[in-house]
Image (cartoon, rainbow, N blue to C red):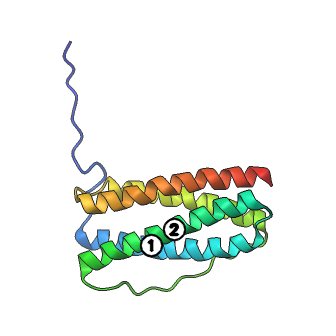
Amino acid sequence: MYYNVQIPQMPILGPYSFHQIIQFIYEAIVGEATAAEFYTRLLEDAPDELHREFIEHARDDELEHLHAFTRLYCYLTGHMPQYTITPVVYSSYKEGILMALKDELEAGEFYRDIQLSTMDKLIRDTFYFAMVDELEHATMFSTLYNTL
C-alpha cells in the first residue's frame, strides 16, 4: 500500500540567518559560563559525596561546552566573544538544585532547536554534543533534588 507522505524539509526548524546563529552561539557561551560559575558555588553547599560528584561532573561538562562554543564562535566570526555573566541567586541549596534542573532542561531544548535549524555539520554537532550532556545533567539534578 502506498501512502502519500510529505518528507520534511531540512532543516526542520530553520533556517536561521548566519547572524541569528552567531547570536545563539553567543547566548550558549554566556549560559555555559553562567552555569559553570553557578555549579562551582553549589559545590560548596553539597551535603555529601554523591551531590559533589554529580555537580562537579556537570560543572566540568559546562566548561567543556563553553570551550567548544567559544571555539565555534571564533571560527565563525574571527574573534573572541566578549561577555559578562550575572551570577545565579538562590536562597537555599535545594532551591539551587531545582533551578539547575530547570536550567538544564531549558538549555537542552534550546540546543535541540538550534541543531534542527541548520544544515551546517559543525554547528549541528557542537549543539548536539552540548544537548546530550544537558539532558544527562537534568537527570542528575533531578536525582539530587529527590534526595533532599
Circle 2 SS class: helix
**Image point 28% across, 48% down: which residue?**
12
Instruction: Identify the residue under disc 2.
Output: 62
Report the front residue among 51 and 28.
51
Spatial CA distance of label 1 from label 2 is 6 Å
Percent of width and height locating residue 55: 65, 63
Looking at numbered disc 1 in the image, what kind of residue is underneath it?
Leu
Q: Is residue 30 left or right of residue 39?
A: left
- Indicate the quadrant containing the C terminus: top left, top right, bottom left or bottom right: bottom right
Instruction: Identify the residue under disc 1.
Output: 66
Q: Is residue 70 left or right of residue 52?
A: left
Report the front residue among 83 and 8.
83
**Image point 24% across, 67% down: which residue?**
17
Looking at numbered disc 2 in the image, what kind of residue is underneath it?
Glu
Circle 1 SS class: helix
Q: Which mark is residue 80?
A: none
Say above or below: 91 vs 14. below
Q: Does the residue at mark 1 contact the one at mark 2 (Cβ under 8 Å)?
A: yes
**Image point 73% across, 54% down: which residue?**
145
Say above or below: 7 vs 9. above
Percent of width and height locating residue 101: 63, 58
Give the class, few, some or many, for how many residues have Cα within 10 Å of label 2's Cα (few <14, many ≥20). many
Percent of width and height locating residue 125: 32, 57
Total number of numbered discs in the rendering: 2
